[in-house]
Image: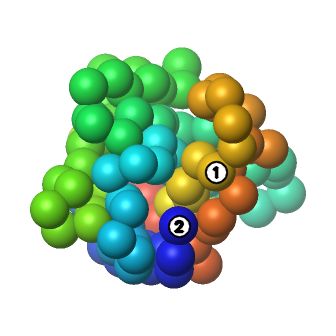
Amino acid sequence: QGQLVESGGGLVQAGGSLRLSCAASGRTFSSYHMGWFRQAPGKEREFVAAITGSGGNTYYGDSVKGRFTISRDNAKNTVYLQMNSLKPEDTAVYYCAAHTQVGFSLNQAGFGSWGQGTQVTVSS
């Protein structure tokens, strides 16, 4: 998988919504399972959501279930993260990543290609 570029981050009030996008270069985007991760200041990077290459299966971290939705448009080489009902604890840098290892899992170690991240700040 080629370059990954995130966009859509910003400052939002608690209860608001944001949609992150991750544009991927390369011609084999649909072959890659994609994921979103986040890292808050002073904390380890954590899993947020993932989607299989076809888009048929999605996975979510417990803290975002029911509030966030991951989707993808393989024709546009883009994966999205719709974030609703945002909370101050959602404040973090959000990273898009492509799963590059054999055998899909939600472990970060399997995601070998990463974007530069986009900042999401939720004010109370």
State the residue at coordinates (47%, 36%): 49
Amino acid at pointer 2: Gln
Q: Which residue is mark 2?
A: 1
Q: Secondary structure at mark 2?
A: loop
- Compared with 6, 85 (above or below) is above
Q: Marks 1 and 2, Cα distance to the nearest angstrom?
A: 8 Å
The reply to whether residue 117 is in sight is: no
Few, some or many residues within 10 Å of mark 2 (<14, 14–19, 20+): some
Q: Position of residue 102 (x, y in %)?
A: 69, 36
Mark 1 residue type: Thr
The structure's colour scheme is rainbow
Q: Residue at x 40, y 75 (%)?
A: 26
Which residue lies at the image location 51% right of the left edge and 60% below the top edge? 96
Helix, strand or loop at label 1? It is loop
Residue 42 in sight here = yes
Q: Is residue 27 left or right of residue 37?
A: left
Q: Is residue 54 left or right of residue 118?
A: left
| Point 36% across, 41% down: residue | 53
For mark 1, what is the residue?
A: 100
**Can you say whether 114 is above or below 44 in the image?**
below
User: Which is more N-terminal, label 2 or label 1?
Assistant: 2
Residue 107 image-quadrant placement: top right
